[in-house]
Amino acid sequence: HNLKHRYEVMETLGKGTYGKVKKAVERASMKTLAIKSIRKERITDDLDKIHIQREIEITSSLRHSNIIRFHEVFESRDKIVIVMEYASRGELYDYIQERRRLPETEARSIFRQITSAVHYCHKNGVVHRDLKLENILLDQDLNVKLADFGLSNHFRRGTLLQTYCGSPLYAAPEIVKGLPYQGPEVDCWALGVLLYALVYSSMPFDGGSHTTLTEQISQGRYHRPNPPSVSCHLHYACALIDWLLTDVANHWWVNWGYEESVCDCSS
Ligand code: ADP
Ligand code: MG
Ligand code: MG
């Protein structure tokens, strides 16, 4: 398989754990794509292998307009190469950083697309476990493209997961406490962190040291500034942040299946 023959490989878009992601043009179709190369020498243990297998298998099985689609995957002597859809405007992280504060309508549209992608994953028994601003990509028209399923896994009702996963800034209390979890509830917590970031352009939990961060998260203690404007939507957004960043979401998940999505909020 000759990569250079079929694709014109261009500039680096981002650095991954196992190699670089580069922009590329498929010569036959003139389509712009992104190529993630995983250097086999960087795969040192079985866990790396499992994560890469899951990333490929799970992403290939998902079809949703807000999830990065794989174009093809192949293997050479020293590399695993993933050719995928290209998200030209890059990471939501940089987008927020540049804009300082997002207009409310834009933040709402972005969050709606993120939740749509995550809901689709959960409905299909997949938990992402690494939702963060760096893994949410944007295309030319500001459509959300959820990426990086490297820590994702399947979940099943009644079976608990326990791996400590993802960035500590987005980690749910059960994760920082090392407790077992169902799966989707840790994504829901991360959604709370993301919504906070979209509304305030800052992070809810950012304690300087690991110990303070763990404390803040375990106690659900975060700074609640006044919303940047007094719109009714923002009022609801703040209520939703509060709901997602409490153990309520967790209890709900443990007690209810995803299909029977009826929440008895009085208990
Ligand atoms: P890792 O698992 O190592 O974090 P990612 O899959 O998240 O690797 O890719 C690393 C970075 O490369 C992303 O955060 C993003 O900046 C860039 N990137 C990855 N995939 C694409 C893509 N399809 N389009 C544009 N940029 C991408
Ligand atoms: Mg990533
Ligand atoms: Mg990854």
Image (tube, grey):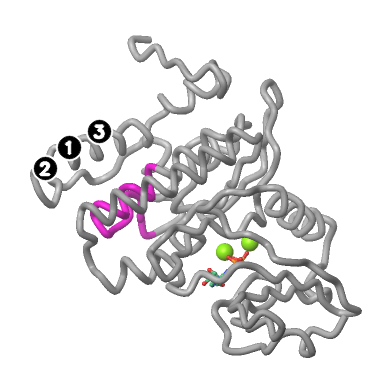
At x 70%, y 71%, the residue is 83
Given residues 209 and 238, the one toward you in this image is 238
Given residues 33 and 225, the one toward you in this image is 33
Per the image, label 1 sits on a secondary structure element best described as helix
Q: Are marks 1 and 2 in contact (CB under 8 Å)?
A: yes
In the image, which disc is placed on residue 147? none
Which amino acid is tagged 1? His
In the image, is residue 44 above or below residue 209? below
At x 68%, y 89%, the residue is 8
At x 30%, y 34%, the residue is 240
Which amino acid is tagged 2? Ser
Q: Which residue is mark 3?
A: 239
At x 75%, y 67%, the residue is 72
Per the image, label 2 sits on a secondary structure element best described as loop
Q: Which residue is mark 1?
A: 235
Name the quarter where the C terminus is drawn.
Answer: top left
Residue 242 pos. (x, y %): 29, 34
Ligand 3, seen in the image, is in the quarter at: bottom right
Horizontally, residue 198 falls left or right of residue 57, namely left
- Which contiguous range is marked in magenta? 192-208
Q: Judge depth for marks 3 and 2 and give the one in front.
A: 2
Q: Which residue is mark 2?
A: 231
Give the distance between the C-alpha atoms of the residues marked 1 and 2, in whole angstroms: 6 Å
Given residues 229 and 243, the one toward you in this image is 229
Indicate if the residue with disc 1 has its beta carbon within 8 Å of ligand 1: no
